[in-house]
Structures are given as structure tokens and as C-alpha cells.
Image (tube, coloured by chain):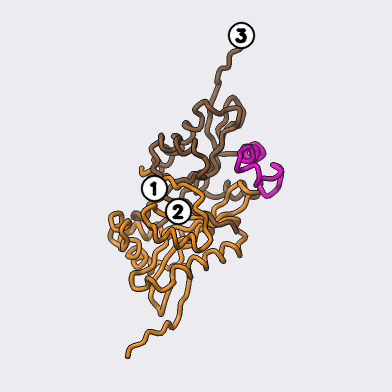
Chain colours: A orange, B brown
């Protein structure tokens, strides 16, 4: 009988060598498939370098048993609203196909919320494509309110 | 007979001395009124200083005939998605009561879109509270698509 033991689950800032695995997760998605390119494209590395150098931007990976199985980006937005309080924006949340249905996404977002709270952020915000109805139930269950309409204009 | 001539309309980065006027516009709003404080609160200045020092963040004011009559914040977000392309996020759009209904908001957003395009941003994005139905018609008319649900979690 084969059993699977989770030896470790770690959330940590992404390293440059994680970029291909992250891009692969971004592309392995009904919406992402059409808009991503070769994971080795140097534009991905340039974007990584900018995020990595920015003290208000964190690209996070979930590493399970040494393998990257999840990713999300946290950006700490400054603004004058609400007495100049900081907001945490979550973008590009993905869980690898091999790790879906096991509660990893919930652990990731809960971790992000705790991290934002520890920083003193007033709000955590994100947008989710209207077609991702499973994701909507997921964010509802985590206490998020769908109070806003998310507008995009592709240039 | 009294006539009003617009002598000048200028969009420019906000200066520290504009902060009270910006905060007054944020507060003069059905949603903003409950969450803003004294425009002289030093936390507003601290937030301004952070935005001002960040090369990827622009707090913009519209100055008409020497008076600040509009504001918006543009943040250029890095991300791996879409071949590492940059996005422009618009937040905290406000037009002063004295300047409403004169097309200023449209000029501001059009200017922001042009600025994002000139930088090479792939997308312009923003969220709008569900209750702001006039704003929704406005963004629709500017070519935005309400493709996303905007989630917020207040900490």
C-alpha cells in the first residue's frame, strides 16, 4: 500500500530559479493558457527581478516536499484613503494541478491575510474573473466581500 | 454678464502641499465620508511621502486655474502574467464637487490610459464599489470591461 506523507509545506519568497515553475502554473489554466509564452522567456525573469527588488512586492511560492506547488503575488499598496493606510493586493494565485483539492489554496490565502494583518494593512483585496465561480465560493468562505466591480481595459 | 473661462487644465504629480485638498476630495463622498479623518493628519503625509518616493506609484492631481479639482492614483504593477507585462492600476479617483458634470473625470481617465499605453502597460485596471452605478456607466463608456469581481476583506 502506498501512502503519501506531506513532509513539509513552506511558504517563501520565490527565487529566480522558481520562475519557470511559476510560469507553468500561470499557463496551466483555462484563462492563462492563451496568454503565456515560453517559461524561459527572459521577460519573465525581468519581471521577477523587478518584483524581487521592490520592498512592497512579494512573489510567494508554496513548496511542498521540495516541489513548488503554488504561487501568489502580494503587493502592499500605499494610498491616502483611510488615513493613509496600506492595502495588500493579492494577484496571480495558482495551485499546481498535482496539489489541487487538498486545501492548499486556503492555506495560502489565510497565510497572506495573516501576513497583511501583521504588517498593519487595513484591507486585503483581489479580483477574480467572473467565470471562476469556484474561486468566488472560495473567497466568500474566507470572509471576503464581493463589494466591487473589477474593470479591465486591455491596451 | 459673468462668464467663466477655463484658463488652464493641468494634470501633474501631487505635491506635499496638495495633500489636504486631496484628502478633502476623498472625504467628500458617500463612501469616503465615514472613513477619513483630519486632512492635516500626519499619516496622510507619511503615505504621500511613500508614494512620492516610489518610482512605480503616481499620485496625480488635476489643477484648473490654479486650483486642485481632481485626483487619482496610478500604480504600475509588476507581475509574471502575460509575459511579465506591467499593469496600470487606478485607485482613488475623485473630482471636486465644484468641477463635477463637466467632463473632467473623462479627461483624467483618458489621460491615465494614454500614460499607461505610453509606458507599455498591457492592461489598465480598477475596481469600483457596486453602489457607484454612475461610475460603472462611465467606465463602460471608456471601453473598460467589467470582467472581474472585486473582493475586499477589511482587517
Above or below for A71 versus B94 = below
Does the magenta-highlighted stretch encompass residue B36?
A: yes
The span from disc 1 to disc 3 (Cα, nearest Å) is 49 Å
Q: Position of residue A39 (x, y in %)?
A: 31, 63
Q: Is residue B89 visible?
A: no
Region in magenta = B15-44
Residue in the picture at 49% in, 48% down: A148
Determine whether label 2 and label 3 are within 8 Å by CB: no
Q: Which residue is mark 1?
A: B147
Tell whether B61 sits left or right of B85: right
Q: Which residue is mark 2?
A: A127
Q: Which residue is mark 3?
A: B1
Quarter of the picture holding the N terminus of chain B: top right
2 or 3: mark nearer the eye: 2
Above or below for A69 versus A75 = below
Q: Residue furthest top?
A: B1
Helix, strand or loop at label 1? It is strand
Total marks drawn? 3
Chain letter of the residue carrying label 3: B
Instruction: Give the crowd class for mark 1: few <14, some 14-19, many >=20 residues within 10 Å.
Output: some
The span from disc 1 to disc 2 (Cα, nearest Å) is 9 Å
Helix, strand or loop at label 2? It is strand
Most foreground residue, A72 or B10: A72
Q: Is residue A6 visible?
A: yes
Helix, strand or loop at label 3? It is loop
Determine whether label 1 and label 2 are within 8 Å by CB: no
Does the magenta-highlighted stretch encompass residue B83?
A: no
Chain letter of the residue carrying label 1: B
Amino acid at each position: 500500500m502506498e501512502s503519501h506523507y506531506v513532509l513539509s509545506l513552506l511558504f517563501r519568497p520565490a527565487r529566480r530559479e522558481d520562475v519557470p515553475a511559476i510560469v507553468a502554473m500561470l499557463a496551466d489554466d483555462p484563462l492563462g493558457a492563451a496568454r503565456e509564452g515560453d517559461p524561459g522567456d527572459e521577460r519573465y525573469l525581468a519581471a521577477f527581478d523587478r518584483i524581487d527588488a521592490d520592498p512592497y512586492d512579494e512573489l510567494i511560492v508554496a513548496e511542498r516536499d521540495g516541489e513548488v506547488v503554488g504561487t501568489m503575488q502580494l503587493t502592499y499598496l500605499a494610498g491616502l484613503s483611510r488615513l493613509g493606510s496600506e492595502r495588500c493586493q493579492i494577484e496571480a494565485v495558482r495551485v499546481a494541478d498535482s496539489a489541487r483539492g487538498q486545501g492548499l489554496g486556503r492555506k495560502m490565502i489565510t497565510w497572506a491575510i495573516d501576513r497583511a494583518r501583521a504588517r498593519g494593512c487595513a484591507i486585503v483585496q483581489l479580483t477574480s474573473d467572473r467565470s471562476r465561480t469556484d474561486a468566488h465560493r472560495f473567497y466568500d468562505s474566507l470572509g471576503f466581500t464581493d463589494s466591487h466591480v473589477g474593470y479591465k481595459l486591455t491596451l
